[in-house]
Amino acid sequence: QAVSIVTESRRASISGLQRRLKVGYNRAARMVEDMEAAGVVSAVQSNGQREVIAPPPV
């Protein structure tokens, strides 16, 4: 569910996942880290943001 939210919104923000899924910071951060390991989002860039690598849903 978290992956679909990130690919639809094209934003990999921890706070966005917290609000949409009603979970805490630690859980949302772990989801984003897992998505990074799976190749859905990039590592944190110099500006503090992550790029969504996965294609948007059809």
Image (cartoon, grey):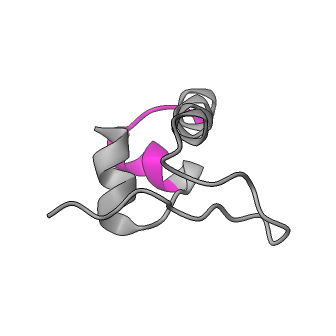
Q: Position of residue 30 (x, y in %)?
A: 60, 29
Which residue is located at x 55 percent, y 52 percent? 41
Front residue of this view, candidates 11 and 22: 11
Q: Relative to 52, does residue 38 appear above or below in the rendering?
A: above
4 relative position to 29: left or right:
left
Residue 18 shown in magenta: yes
Looking at the picture, how far across and down is residue 23, in whole percent? 45, 32
Q: Position of residue 10 (x, y in %)?
A: 42, 67
Q: Residue at x 59, y 41 (%)?
A: 36
Residue lying at 35% horizontally and 58% vertically, measured from the top left: 7
Looking at the image, residue 46 lies above or below residue 26: below
Question: Is residue 32 within the magenta segment?
Answer: no
- The outermost residue toward the bottom is 47
Quadrant assignment, res 27: top right
Count of number-bearing discs: 0
Instruction: Report which quarter residue 58 is drawn in.
Output: bottom left
Q: Is residue 29 left or right of residue 18?
A: right
Q: Position of residue 18 (x, y in %)?
A: 47, 44
Q: Main secondary structure of the magenta part?
A: helix
User: Which region of the structure is painted magenta?
Assistant: 16-25
Q: Going by the picture, which residue comes out furthest to the right? A: 46
Q: Quadrant of the N terminus?
A: top left
Please tell me which residue lies in front, 37 or 13. 37
Residue at x-position 63% and y-position 54%: 42
